[in-house]
Image: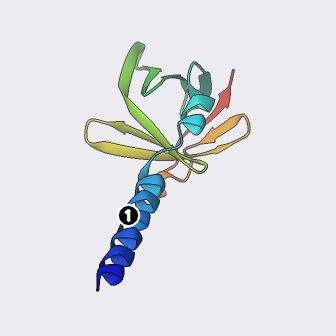
Amino acid sequence: MKNTIKLFGIIVLIAIIGFSMIACEDDSLRDTLDGTTWKANFGGSDFVLTFNSPNFTMTWTEDGGTETESGTYSISGNNVSLISGGEVFIGILSGNNLDFSGEAGHFGPIFTKQ
């Protein structure tokens, strides 16, 4: 009986460690964007997206003025999530491109790393 409880405890411990490793974001991936600047032109507006881990700032020109959006970001595989104001925008990172064109069925900018 003691061996069964001990075995069960070891299995639970392994499961907890495994799930915590899966749930943790890979900091090395986040570092690939940290300190970088990306630019895009979309719909006649120039966009600038900067990453300063764990935050992002995006500025763009609209109606002759400059708009700014900021929030946090995360990376899972090649998906980059920008979280701001309760909304999440997901882009696909591929080399020097960060593509938001397929986001939620909308057309969005494709950023190029500067």
The quadrant holding residue 87 is top left
Q: Residue at x 37, y 45 (%)?
A: 88
Vertical arrangement, residue 70 with respect to residue 102, above or below: above
Image vertical order of residue 77 relative to residue 26, above or below: below
Which residue occupies the foreground of this view, 18 or 74? 18
Left or right, 93 with reference to 81: right
Residue type, numbered disc 1 = Leu
**Residue lying farthest top?**
65
Q: Residue at x 42, y 45 (%)?
A: 89
Residue 104 image-quadrant placement: bottom left
**Which residue shows up at 38% across the image and 63% down it?**
13
Looking at the rendered structure, the number of numbered marks drawn on it comes to 1
Measuring from the top left, give residue 44's x and y in whole percent.
55, 28
> Which is more toward the observer, 69 or 1?
1
64 left or right, relative to 113? left
Q: Residue at x 35, y 77 (%)?
A: 8
Which quadrant: the C terminus? top right
- Residue sitting at the far left: 86
Q: Residue furthest right?
A: 95
Percent of width and height locating residue 9: 33, 70
Secondary element at image label 1: helix
Q: Which residue in the rendered view is the most extreme toward the bottom?
A: 1
Q: Give the image location of residue 103, x and y in percent.
A: 49, 51
User: Where the N terminus falls, by quadrant?
Assistant: bottom left
- Please name the colour scheme applied to the rendered image: rainbow
Where is mark 1, residue-wise? 13
Crowd class of label 1 (few under 14; some 14 to 19; many from 20; radius 10 Å): few
Query: Does residue 19 lie above or below 65 as drawn?
Result: below
Foreground: 88 or 1?
1
**Within the image, what quadrant is residue 29 found in?**
top right
